Amino acid sequence: MISRISEFRDITARYDIALCDVWGVLHNGVAAFPGAGEALAAARARGMTVVLITNSPRPSPGVIAQIRGLGVPDEAYDRIVTSGDVTRALIAAGPKKIYFIGSDRDLPLIEGLNVQMVSCEEADAIVCAGFFDDESETPEDYRATLKTAAARKLPLICANPDLVVERGHRLIPCAGAIAKLYGELGGETRIAGKPHKPIYRAALTEAKAVRGSVDFSRVLAIGDGMPTDVRGAIDSGLDLLYISAGIHAKDYMTGEKTDESKLKAFLKAEGASPKWWMPRLA
């Protein structure tokens, strides 16, 4: 039975480790959410280990710089693991000639790896970190390219499994939306980020490095995305704190008000059973 909590501190004594999502929980791409980072910092002061676990395609140094600039305090977390971090291993193990889909800001994903960026016609694999222009494009803009690549049986390595992300008060498409279309076209996708196991293994390894041991019954996942955070927590057998004012808010919220009956119906329809929920981490 899902329970609403008023403050994060209401449940922190039950857990040793929090695996906390970043975008949609700590910030919206424009600014940090008031009180969210501070709630994690207070939990750390009481002995909790916090590992941020994000589907950002950037390796962790870039995300650390980004969230610091948005106002997330360094004291909010012990370690950070990104989809970019774990995806680099997939890229390194894959074909060397790649067609790269993403903006210039995504290029650190392949920095230092033994790969060659080529045209789609020359490529032996696709690496998708995002859109060339996520402000104006949709997955349909890539349909023709993806259809040709699928016919050639090119694997698509997706560095950000998120379908959408908040940017201010808008939802912006992510690489996961392209990967979803590629799969629908019959293409092979390779994904290491949430909800898949590699990123959770990496995050728990980081937690163990901080604490020395991990009791899985005392690990809490925190997130707002159904296909990523929620599914990943379920598949990994973790308790989940669901942040309801994130990307699914339109399904059960009017303004700042949550219709709890609609929320419960939404969760039931999604096959999701978080242990806890609150609108925003605080």
Image (spheres, rainbow, N blue to C red):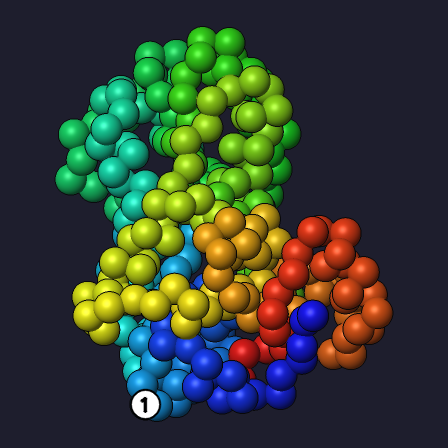
Percent coordinates x, y for residue 142 in the rendering = 56, 27
Residue at 37% in and 53% down: 200
Q: Is residue 254 visible?
A: no
Q: How far across and how far down the image is residue 134, in percent?
A: 53, 45
Residue ID at (46%, 53%): 236
Towards the viewer: 224 or 241? 241
Q: Which residue is mark 1?
A: 45
Q: Is residue 14 shown left or right of residue 180?
A: left
Q: Position of residue 206 (x, y in %)?
A: 25, 62
Residue drawn where x is 68% and y is 71% of the image:
2
Q: Indicate whether 59 appears above or below 93.
A: below
Depth order, front residue of 184/47: 47
Can you tell which quarter of the image residue 156 is in? top left
Quadrant in the rendering for residue 171:
bottom right
Looking at the rendered structure, the secondary structure element under dot 1 is: helix
* Residue 114 visible somewhere in the drawing: yes
x 27%, y 73%: residue: 78
In the rendered image, the vertical position of residue 212 relative to residue 141, given as above or below: below
Q: Is residue 226 above or below residue 207?
A: above
Q: Give, as a three-letter code, the residue at label 1.
A: Ala
Q: Mark 1, residues whose alpha carbon is within 10 Å: few (<14), some, or many (≥20)?
A: few
